[in-house]
């Protein structure tokens, strides 16, 4: 602890993140501005807390509303689960056993499409809209591979790759 702040240092072994899910709990419905210290104090009656991880947005640093608590002993997890639906900072929190890859998780890479949220979703939407505008502008339908334009003389669509007769 330095200046009343906890500093978390992750150790790098082989590049893969390893978590002991038997000694960890998932905590949901957290306030977005919650501090790790508040969670550590809240779960201290359950046993020795080794680590608290509040998941935060990488660009803004604001919490995403969930986190993980790692205990020294797996028996502390049982006590922590009994605190489900208790109140922390004015909100009812959800406490569950930590799982390696929960069902419906967007981190699963087994044939699931990545879901975008927030600014990523907005950015993806505008990219798609821009692409559709360009397709309409050049007369490209989803089944065509080359853009076409409307020939004003005979009202037919011609590909840009086709050369006009007489030129």
Image (cartoon, rainbow, N blue to C red):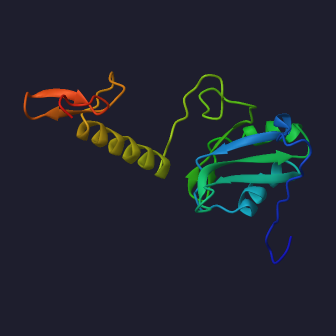
In front of the other: 128 or 51: 128
Looking at the image, residue 53 lies above or below residue 17: below
Q: 98 or 142: nearer the eye? A: 142
- Residue appearing at x 88%, y 37% in the figure: 74
Q: Nearer the viewer, residue 126 or 65?
A: 126
Residue drawn at the location 73% of the way across and 60% of the way down: 36
Left or right, 83 with respect to 91, comes to right
Residue 161 occupies quadrant = top left
Q: Is residue 125 above or below residue 142?
A: below
* Residue 61 in picture, x, y percent from top left: 62, 62
Count of marks, rendered view: 0
Image quadrant where one finds the N terminus: bottom right
Of all residues, the one furthest to the bottom in this rendering is 3
Residue 30 placement (x, y as % from top left) = 60, 52
Q: Is residue 129 left or right of residue 23?
A: left
Quarter of the image that includes the C terminus: top left
Reply above or below: 141 against 118. Answer: above
Percent x, y of residue 164: 21, 31
User: Residue 25, how many percent across, how many down?
Assistant: 75, 41
Q: Residue at x 78, y 53 (%)?
A: 52
Which quadrant would residue 143 be assigned to in this image? top left
């Amino acid at each position: 602890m330095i200046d009343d702040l906890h500093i978390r240092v992750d150790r790098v072994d082989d590049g893969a993140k390893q978590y002991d899910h038997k000694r960890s709990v998932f905590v949901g419905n957290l306030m977005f501005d919650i501090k790790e210290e508040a969670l550590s104090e809240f779960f201290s009656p359950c046993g020795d807390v080794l680590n608290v991880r509040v998941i935060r947005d990488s660009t803004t640093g604001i919490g995403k509303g969930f986190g993980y608590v790692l205990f020294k002993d797996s028996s502390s997890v049982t006590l922590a689960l009994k605190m489900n639906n208790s109140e922390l900072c004015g909100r009812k929190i959800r406490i569950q056993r930590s799982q390696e890859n929960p069902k419906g998780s967007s981190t699963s890479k087994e044939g699931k499409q990545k879901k975008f949220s927030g600014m990523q979703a907005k950015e993806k939407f505008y990219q798609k809209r821009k692409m559709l505008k360009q397709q309409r502008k050049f007369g490209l339908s989803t089944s065509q591979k080359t853009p076409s334009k409307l020939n004003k003389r005979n009202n037919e669509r011609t590909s840009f790759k086709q050369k006009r007769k007489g030129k």
